[in-house]
Image (cartoon, coloured by chain):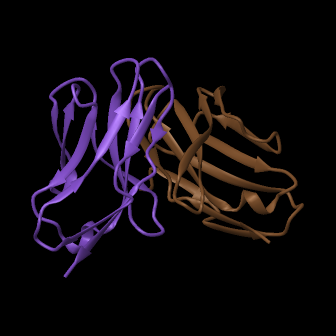
Chain colours: A brown, B purple
Amino acid sequence: DTAVSQTPKYLVTQMGNDKSIKCEQNLGHDTMYWYKQDSKKFLKIMFSYNNKELIINETVPNRFSPKSPDKAHLNLHINSLELGDSAVYFCASSQVVGTYEQYFGPGTRLTVT
Amino acid sequence: AQSVTQLDSHVSVSEGTPVLLRCNYSSSYSPSLFWYVQHPNKGLQLLLKYTSAATLVKGINGFEAEFKKSETSFHLTKPSAHMSDAAEYFCVVSPAGTYKYIFGTGTRLKVLA
C-alpha cells in the first residue's frame, strides 16, 4: 500500500493557467507538508498543516494556496502559473509536528511552458 | 540561524570501497538530524535519524552515521559501496522546538564498477 501518494505524477501546462496537485497519506499522521525541489535539487518547505490547521507558511507567492479538507489530504492549488514555478513538488507527512521523521510522496514534476 | 552544510556536492567511489558523505550543522538547540536518499526520479526515503539517543545511528542498507556535538557533524558512512547506492543524499536538521526540516544541498554519490 502506498503511504503518501500524489497526483498527478507529471503536469505540463502553459503560463497563466491554474492547476492543482493532490496529496493523500494513509499513515494516520497528523501533519502534512509541501516542499519544492528546484532544478539544482534544493528542497525547501512551502507549507505545513497540522490537523487541518496551517502551521508553516514560508515566503511563498500567494498564487500558491494549500487546502486540507481532512488530516489525510493536503492539496496545493497554483494560480496564474509562471515559468519559475517549474519544479518537482513533494508532499510529506509525519506523525506529529517537529522532530519525527517525515515520509515523502513520489513527487509531481510540474513543467510550465 | 539554523543551517546544514553538505561539504561535497559530488562523491565518486568504486564498488566495494567505503563511502563517506559529510554533513555539518548549525543549530541553537539540540537538533534532530536525518539522512535521506533520493534515487533518480523517485521520492525521498529515510536512511536514518538521530534524536538525542545513541550517538552512533544505524540505518537501512548498511548505512550509519555518528553524531559529534563537539564537531557539529553528522557524517554518513557505509563500509562497502554497492552499485544500487548511487543516488542523491540529503542531510536534514530539525532544530528542537521547531516544526521545520532544513535540507542540505545534497551530495550525489556515484559508484564506479
Residue situated furthest bottom in the rendering: B113
Percent x, y of residue A56: 62, 28
Q: Is residue A26 left or right of residue A69?
A: left
> Residue A86, relative to residue A70: is it above or below?
below
Name the foreground residue: A2 vs A79: A79
Q: How many marks?
A: 0
Rendered residue at 47%/35% (across/down): B101
> Residue A108, relative to residue B110: is it above or below?
above
Rendered residue at 39%/43% (across/down): B5
Rendered residue at 43%/31% (across/down): A95
Q: Is residue B42 left or right of residue A69?
A: left
Rendered residue at 86%/65% (across/down): A15
Percent x, y of residue A70: 64, 34
Percent x, y of residue A37: 57, 54
- Quarter location, residue A47: top right
Report the quarter where the C terminus of chain B lies.
bottom left
